Image (cartoon, rainbow, N blue to C red):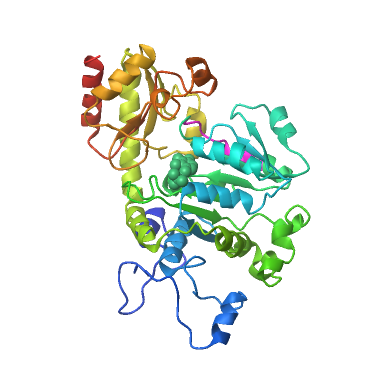
Amino acid sequence: MGKKKQRIETTCVQGGYHPGNGEPRQIPIIQSTTFKYNTGADMGKLFDLEASGYFYTRLQNPTNDAVAAKICELEGGTAAMLTSSGQAANFYAVFNIANCGDHVVSLSAIYGGTFNLFSVTMKKMGIDFTFLSPDCTDEELESAFRPNTKAVFGETIANPALRVLDIERFAKAAHKHGVPLIVDNTFATPVNCRPIEWGADIVTHSTTKYMDGHGAGVGGCIVDSGKFDWTKYPDRFPGLCTPDESYHGVTYTERFGLGGAFITKATAQLMRDFGSIQSPQNAFLLNLGLESLHVRMARHCENGQAVAEYLSSDDRISFVTYCGLPTDRDHALAQKYLPNGSCGVVSFGVKGGRAAAEKFMSNLKLAAIETHVADARTCCLHPASTTHRQMSDAELIAAGVSPDLIRLSCGLENKEDLIDDIKQALDAL
Ligand SMILES: *Cc1c(COP(=O)(O)O)cnc(C)c1O
C-alpha cells in the first residue's frame, strides 16, 4: 500500500504481527517464562536497557508485544503495553505519574471499579482525587486543578452511565494546566473513536470487553500518544525526567524520547514491581477478538440502536439512555466523537420500579443475567438488586442509578430476536 495510511479494518486484521518467510501465519503463543542467552554480557545489556530483547515474561513477551503493537496502531499511539486487567491498566496509567502527595482530576461518570480504585485504594496511597460531573461548568473545571495535579481522567463512553466524554474540552483544560488527559476507551474501542486524534495523551482499555469480545479472557492495555511533552514540566514529572535510581540511573525521556518514555517507565518500574502481566495465552485470544473487532462493533451498534429505538417507542418503559437516540442528552457529543456508532450497551427503566425491573429481567429468555458487558451474547444487569443492592432507593438515585435501571449489553444475535425477547418479557409482567 506504499505510504498511504492503512484503514482501521485492515489494522484490526493484520496489524502488530508481520511474519517473515516460513514463519507462522498466526501469532505464536510464546508460552515461556524466560529466554536463553549465550553469555552473561549479552543478557546484562538487556537489563541495562541498552539492547532490546526478551529475558523474562513479567517484563516483556513476544506474543504480548505483538498484540500491544496492534492496539497501539489502532489507537494511533507510539507505544503500548498489555496488563492483566483493565483495573491494572488504569492503575498503572495514573500511578506512573501521580504518587503520594499528588492529585488527579477525574470525571465522576466512570466505571464503579475505577471509582473505587481512585477513591479508596489510591487515596490510601496518598493520592487525592477531585471528581467532576460531565456537566460541570467551566468555572468548576478550572477550579478543580491544584499545583500538585498530575492528570485528568475520563471514559469515552462511561460505564454504566453511558455519558459521552467531551474529549477536546477536557484535553484543552488538562493541557492548559500542563498535565495529560488519560481516556479509558473501553466502550467505544478505536473502531468507533480514537481519543488521541481529539487531544487525549494516554488511552487505556479493559480488553475484557469488546476487544476480546467473547467473554474469554480478562485483560487490559495502555497506549501512549507520545505527544505529551513531559520535559516541559520536569518538576511536575520527575519520574520521567530525572534518573531512575532503581533502574541504573536511566532518565526515561532522554533514553526513550517522548514516544517511548511513558510505556518504558510503566514496564520497567511498575510491571517489574507489581507484576500484573497478561498471560501470552490470553493475549493470543485477545488478538483473535481484535481480528473481527471492526465487523463486530458495527453489529453491536446496529443492535444497540434498534433496541434503543424500540424501547423508546414502548410506553411500558420509563426512560432510555443511548447516545445514538436523537433525544439523548449526549447525542450532539456522540455525533461529533462517535459518528459511526457508540457501542451495544443501552440502559433503560421499566415502569413499576425495582420490582418490575427484577421481574422483567427474570422473564428474559435470550438475554442472560450477568455481571458483564460487551461480548457476543446479549446480557443484562439490574444494578439495584445486584452490584448496588446494599443501597437504598434514595442512595441509588444520588449515585445516578435509578431503582428500575437495567443495563442491557446487546450482543451479536439477530436484532429482531432481541426485541422479541424484550417484548415477551414486558408482556409477561
Ligand atoms: C470493565 C471495565 C474496567 C475494568 O476492567 P477489568 O478488565 O474488568 O479489570 C475499566 N474500565 C471500564 C470502562 C470497564 O468497562
Left or right: 165 with respect to 310? right
Name the spot of residue 22 as percent of width and height, x first: 30, 79
Name the spot of residue 343 as percent of width and height, x first: 39, 38
Residue 251, image quadrant? bottom right
Left or right: 287 with respect to 108? left
Q: Can residue 194 be seen in the rendering of this structure?
A: no
Q: Quadrant of the C terminus?
A: top left
Magenta stretch holds residue 168: yes
Q: Which residue does the image show at 72% across and 28% down from the upper left?
A: 139
Name the spot of residue 160 as percent of width and height, x first: 45, 32
- Image position of 423 with respect to 112: above or below: above
Left or right: 58 with respect to 240? left
- Image position of 191 with respect to 403: above or below: below
Q: Which residue does the image show at 46% across and 62% down from the upper left?
A: 69
Residue 120, image quadrant? top right
Magenta stretch holds residue 42: no
Name the spot of residue 234 as percent of width and height, x first: 77, 57
Q: Can residue 405 be seen in the rendering of this structure?
A: yes
Q: Quadrant of the N terminus?
A: bottom left
Q: Name the foreground residue: 45 vs 170.
A: 45
- Image position of 54 with respect to 117: above or below: below
Q: Which residues are magenta?
A: 162-172
**Count of all numbered marks drawn on residues in the image:** 0
- Image position of 374 with respect to 160: above or below: below
Q: Which residue does the image show at 21% across and 20% down from the upper left?
A: 424
